[in-house]
Image (spheres, rainbow, N blue to C red):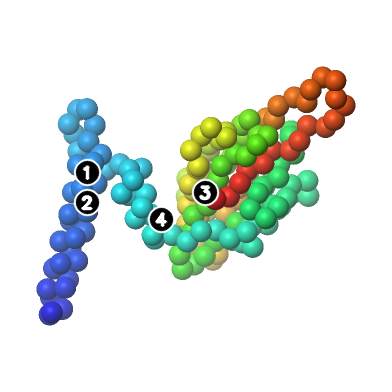
């Protein structure tokens, strides 16, 4: 095949994909819009990103830690973790609140990007966050706060367990 034909086919595929995104994202007002949270767009996004590895994350606060692929966050403590960015590729981290966590608030802060603020619980869908490419490899900051765990039974004298957030 000639080079021009390949370029034409590539552009045609991009236009078809954009059209499918707009048709799939129609709202009740019959106005076309692109919805980037539809399964097709999520799948493409997953192909274009790499998962964050545990080795790329470090705890900033002494009370907080990463145990394998699980963040351990004590109650009433704000925990910060630094995630190493890459100059070459966008990374992705998927988070899910794990037992005994009832809910926890998180913020993802990055240079030259909007801060993401979310509350997650074990019942919510896994939260997928992008760590954008950065020429100077500046770390992204993942901050957990407002950890809520169930109260221990009254007849027991035990400490509340810490919140747990798992990476998928």
Q: Position of residue 141 (x, y in %)?
A: 60, 50
Residue occupied by mark 2: 18
Q: Earlier in the sequence, mark 1 or mark 4?
A: 1
Tally the marks. 4
Q: Position of residue 100 (x, y in %)?
A: 68, 34
Q: Earlier in the sequence, mark 3 or mark 1?
A: 1
Residue drawn at point x = 60 percent, y = 39 percent: 97
Q: Position of residue 82 (x, y in %)?
A: 63, 55
Residue occupied by mark 4: 46
Q: Earlier in the sequence, mark 3 or mark 2?
A: 2
Q: Which mark is residue 22?
A: 1
**24 versus 155 height, above or below:** below
Element assignment for label 1: helix
- Residue 145 in view in this figure: no
Q: Nearer the viewer, residue 109 or 28?
A: 28
Callout 2 crowding tier (Cα within 10 Å): few <14, some 14–19, many ≥20 = some
| Spatial CA span between label 4 and label 3 | 11 Å
Element assignment for label 3: strand
| Spatial CA span between label 3 and label 1 | 26 Å
Q: Are marks 3 and 1 in contact (CB under 8 Å)?
A: no
**43 versus 106 height, above or below:** below
């Amino acid at each position: 095949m000639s080079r021009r034909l390949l370029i034409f086919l590539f552009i045609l595929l991009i236009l078809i994909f954009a059209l499918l995104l707009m048709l799939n994202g129609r709202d009740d007002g019959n106005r076309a819009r692109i919805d980037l949270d539809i399964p097709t767009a999520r799948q493409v996004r997953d192909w274009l990103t790499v998962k964050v590895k545990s080795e790329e994350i470090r705890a900033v606060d002494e009370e907080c830690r990463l145990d394998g692929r699980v963040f351990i966050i004590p109650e009433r403590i704000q925990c910060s973790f630094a995630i190493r960015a890459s100059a070459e590729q966008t990374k992705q981290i998927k988070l899910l609140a794990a037992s005994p966590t009832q809910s926890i608030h998180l913020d993802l802060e990055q240079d030259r990007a909007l801060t993401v603020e979310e509350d997650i619980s074990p019942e919510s869908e896994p939260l997928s966050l992008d760590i954008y490419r950065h020429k100077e490899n500046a770390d992204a900051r993942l901050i957990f706060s407002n950890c809520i765990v169930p109260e221990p039974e009254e007849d027991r004298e035990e400490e509340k367990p810490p919140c747990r957030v798992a990476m998928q």
